[in-house]
Amino acid sequence: MRGRGLKLPDLRRLLIAGAPVSGELLAKLRIVAPNCVTHTPYGATECLPVTTVTADELLGEARQLALRGQGTCVGRPVSGVEIRVIRESDGPLLTLAEAQPCAPGEIGEIIAYRPERDPRV
């Protein structure tokens, strides 16, 4: 990107989804589009988006934590989404009561609930 002198000063927002985005790419985008706020949402087919995080957030403390092996930051829940981080399970959970919550800082599985995606509603 930089080698070609590409500049996008008028780009204001960019959404990158579908796969994890490297810190290197986010840093390069800052140079090419300095006035742009880049979001990298996280989600699953059943509930999308679940969370969102900006490039500024990912390039700060979150990047340092990830480089030390302390997990990957996926941001904060979007409005209307309830999230829990639970311990991994070897089989399916039939009820939410079976889910064992993780302690703060513990790596686990993310489960999300969004009322408009609930077939019971």
Image (cartoon, helix red, strand yellow):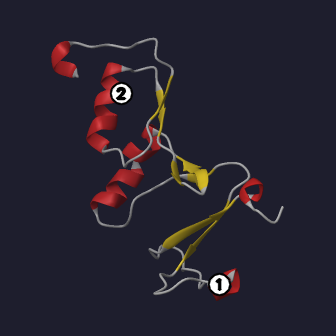
Closer to us: 117 or 87: 117
The amino acid on which the numbered mark 1 sits, given as a three-letter code, is Leu
Other-residue count near label 1 (Cα within 10 Å), few / some / many at <14 / 14–19 / ≥20: few
- Residue 9 placed where, x, y %? 41, 12
Q: What residue lies at 76% left-to-right and 53% top-to-bottom?
A: 116
Q: Quadrant of the C terminus?
A: bottom right
Side of 23 relative to 37 (left or right): left
Side of 18 relative to 87 (left or right): left
Other-residue count near label 2 (Cα within 10 Å), few / some / many at <14 / 14–19 / ≥20: some
Secondary element type, mark 2: helix
Closer to us: 82 or 102: 82
- Residue 46 placed where, x, y %? 60, 57
- Residue 38 placed where, x, y %? 46, 33
Is 104 rendered above or below residue 80? below
The amino acid on which the numbered mark 2 sits, given as a three-letter code, is Arg
Q: Quadrant of residue 30?
A: top left
Q: What residue lies at 46% left-to-right and 44% top-to-bottom?
A: 57
Is 16 rendered above or below residue 58? above
Q: Which residue is mark 2?
A: 30
Q: Which residue is mark 1?
A: 94
Q: Quadrant of the N terminus?
A: top left
Side of 112 relative to 2 (left or right): right
